[in-house]
Image: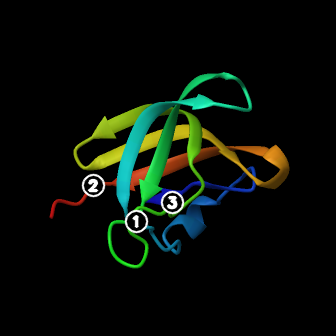
Amino acid sequence: MVRLWRDGIQVPRWQLAQLQPVAGELRIEENKDELLRRFLRVARLLGCTAPDLGRDMLPPLVDAAVIYIKGDRISISGFERGEMSQTYAQTWLVETVTA
């Protein structure tokens, strides 16, 4: 999985191939958001090997929406929250791997 935005700025296409993908278990579920006081879909990438087992590998995507699925590729858009509740648009490009 690679993130297509960095701090609210789109990563240039020529840099995408240089990004180091992050591996983990993708989960999308509805959770109550305490900040907005409503239920939202949240996408999380959790570590699946020690020492990161069950730990968020990246900041969760709030209000996540699956934009595209084809073959082994998935695109998910939403918002990342930074420190002090800053919100940035984010898109994850996910490539599924079968074990």
Q: Identify the residue at the far bottom of this view.
A: 51
For badge 1, the amino acid type reads Gly
Q: Is mark 3 on a helix, strand or loop?
A: loop
Label 2 – label 3 distance at C-alpha:
18 Å
For badge 2, the amino acid type reads Thr
Label 2 – label 1 distance at C-alpha:
15 Å
Q: Is residue 9 left or right of residue 28?
A: right
Q: Position of residue 31 (x, y in %)?
A: 52, 31
Q: In this view, does 92 lie to the left or right of 11?
A: left
Residues under numbered marks 1 and 3 in contact, where contact means CB atoms less than 8 Å apart? yes
Q: Work out whether residue 86 can be spotted.
A: no
Q: Which of 9 and 27 is in front in this view?
A: 27
Residue 40 falls in which quadrant of the image? Answer: top right
Counting residues from the start of the chain, the first of labels 2 and 1 encountered is: 1
Counting residues from the start of the chain, the first of labels 1 and 3 encountered is: 1
For badge 3, the amino acid type reads Asp
Q: Name the residue under label 3.
A: 56
Q: What element carries label 2?
A: loop
Q: Residues within 10 Å of mark 2 (few under 14, many from 20)?
A: some
Q: Residue 96 carries which label?
A: 2
Q: At 36% from the left edge and 77% from the top edge, which residue is drawn? A: 50
Q: At 45% from the left edge and 67% from the top edge, which residue is drawn? A: 22
Q: Name the residue under label 1.
A: 47
Q: Could you tell me which quadrant the N terminus lies in?
A: bottom left
> In the image, is residue 45 above or below residue 21?
above
Q: Position of residue 85 (x, y in %)?
A: 80, 45
Q: Could you tell me which quadrant the C terminus lies in?
A: bottom left
Q: What element carries label 1?
A: loop
> In the image, is residue 38 above or below residue 3?
above
